[in-house]
Image: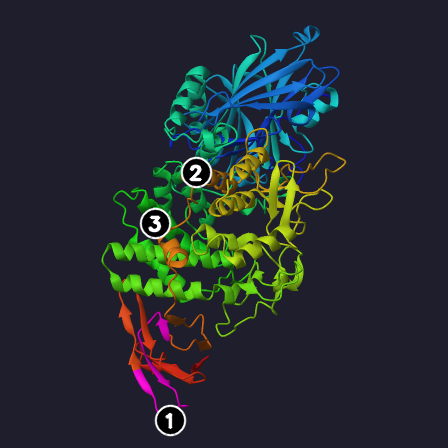
Amino acid sequence: MSHPSSSIAFGAPGIEPRWTSSAKIGVGTAYSSSSNVWFTLSHGIVNEIYYPHVDLPNTRDLQFLISDGETFCHQESTDMDHEVEYPEENVLFYRLINRDRGGRYRIIKEILGEPHSPVLLVHTKLEILDPSYEGKLRMYVLLAPHVKGTGRNNNARWEDVGGRNLLHAYREEIHLMLGCHPDFSKRSVGFVGASDGWRDLMDNFQMDWEFQSAVDGNLALTAEVDLTDGLEFTVGVGFGYSQQSASTQLLQAFATPFDQLKKRYFEQWQRTRNDMDLASHTGDGASMVRLSKCVLLAHEDKIFPGASVASLSIPWGEIKDDSDRGGYHLVWTRDMVHTATALLACGETESPLRALIWLSCVQAPDGCLPQNSGINGAPYWQAIQLDEVAAPILLAWRLLQHDALRDFDPRTVVFRAARFLILNGPVTGQERWEENAGYSPSTLASLIAGLVGAAEFASRQDDDETARILLDHADWLEANLEKWTTTKCGELLEGTPKHYIRITPADPGDPVASPDPDTVEIHIANGGGIHPARNVISGDFLQLVRLGIRDASDPLIVDSIAVLDHVLKRELPQGPSWRRYNHDGYGQNPDGTAFDGTGEGRCWVILTGERGHYELAAGKDPLPFIQAIEDFANEGGMLPEQLWDAEDLPDGKMKMGAPTGSAMPLCWSHAEYLALVNSRRNGVCFDRMEPVYQRYVANRVAASVSIWTLSHQLQSVDPGQKMRVVLDQAAMVRFSTNDWNTHTDLELVYHETLDLWWVDLPTSELKSGTLVRFTFCWKQGNHWENRNFHFVLR
């Protein structure tokens, strides 16, 4: 291939950019807030490098091309066999060994983030195994920039800084500098699919192009490593808000011997070590425990401390363009509280407290939390998930139990959340799978536990009235669990018609509707179709046992377990796992191709952990489930979201029990594992809230009131119960028990702590069949509601 005469690359803007595989074998960062760079690894190479935040990738991949200049050019990710090692415990430090399949050479790489600056370093050694190739092999660095989260509109050029040959990629305010110590001998920038270095080298196994500039496109940076003085070198990628900043930090990193930087990197991570011995509660001597803890810590941002993303991967990224990086780079309150809870179980208190404080700063004044958000707290998706609203209460309660709140007072975030749950429950806009609205067993479990937890905070302040209001509401929810979330005529398992279902669909915008779990239909997302809700089951009801609301031996729980196992359990080579629910469409397609809006939901790692928690609550040893999860991990110890649960595919793409193309690592999976190990050590589920267990299992309390709100307008009340009306503003209620022939007026009482108004209608003495009509006169503006409401005594 001839040397081009132009210094400007041709072929703009390049092919359509794509992200890369989610099959990570490692993630890493320095354990220092001054080193705000993160990296992922897969297929023996570096993939995404994140900067300046944990949610913003700036590269697609970084790898080597190796050529003898005459007969071959190998690409690290596709043409070699890969191995990963962890040389140091409690440290996210990786040694990657990539072997030529012909036995001629191997590449050994050690990868870390510079301990105090945003620089990624890859210390590399080329070992010649076939003496006939001594002095013949050449190595080239190939980097695909996706600066500021996109492969589009990138710019690149040569930079000569301080006598060093660097490559510079930039977009808007983010700058990336690629360099090597010792220096590069050749450089080129080009458009992917036209003038990139991979295309150049694969043509004749030599680097002919040396383009100096490429503007506004999908780019690749290529450089030849100078091997004349030895086969050991360090490649670095520095970041900054200017070319000067990025290049300065890169060259400063090169000025310190790699072994010294490695020592500092180790020392930083070793600060996370504690004396908790969990080896006897695992199947691998606590190796996965140590790694999982580090993985969770690595997902926290350093400029917005406390904010942790769900995963440093892009599910099915190989088919995703820049418009769809996947929601896993967002902060999900549910996932983050799982992460914080697992770290707390491992004796880590600082990160969980930071998470709670971050949530308190994101929470709206009315107590709502966004479905998900950026690390800066800006809402992204707009659905309301009541379990996420309750999550900060659960985290605050657990921090309180571990004396880990320090000087932070969580009552504002706790009582605001409780207020929102009272005024907007029990129907959730979405359940924990983020797909359907209605009465969800797992969401209701979070609401009940959250309200009891909030009552604990009130009681500690001798605020008995607040505690009573919160407990009354929790009792009412608990008393209606079976009515709202079970079927009496299920057809999934012969002889077991009564069991919990996945969700009873209901519209939060229709406060009067009272759907029947036996007759209502559910529309399942991702192409799952429409089915009778009574015949769609999930393991979500297990949260009732985990949090302490139902006993593991409760007959309805036991029957639901039988149905669950019959429909969703899969025996994998490593052990049992479960699908989320029947007809699930979120997962790998049956032919092994990526999820593309439809697919087939597979087994989830977290569901093996959740079952382990249930078995512990039932008095059994959860160790087999712990060991299964350990065996679900890939060679780098990363746990995926989903597992392939069908027979091996002939092309080898999918193997039974191995990860699919879903997110990996998934923080929730690692958190579930850590929680289960610690639960086994404690002999009780770590998540179980003792006040909840005592109230509803050990000494069950009967509900004394039913609750009426504008968002959930009850149409009936049991005889002997009061009807409590709860509103978000001052009002007088006028009610009648004889079709307005006479009426009674009652003022709603303001409750300052919860910032709501309430009154109990005197219905406990009314006869069965009595129809109560009522309306409101609003104090603000002194106007009537101009519509009537009603309910009947059953």
- State the residue position of label 3: 397
- Specify the farthest residue to the bottom: 741
**N-terminal label among 1 and 3:** 3
Instruction: Say which of marks 2 and 3 sits in front.
Output: 2
Query: Residue 426: x percent and y percent?
Result: 45, 64
Residue nearer the viewer, 702 or 642: 702
Mark 2–mark 1 distance (CA, rounded to whole Å): 63 Å
Q: Which residue sits at x=63%, y=16%?
A: 106
Residue nearer the viewer, 595 or 645: 645
Q: Amino acid at mark 1?
A: Asn
Query: Residue 219: x percent and y percent?
Result: 61, 33
- State the residue position of label 2: 678
Mark 1–mark 3 distance (CA, rounded to whole Å): 50 Å
Look at the picture and state if 439 lies above or below 282: below
| Magenta extent | 722-745
Q: Amino acid at mark 3?
A: Trp
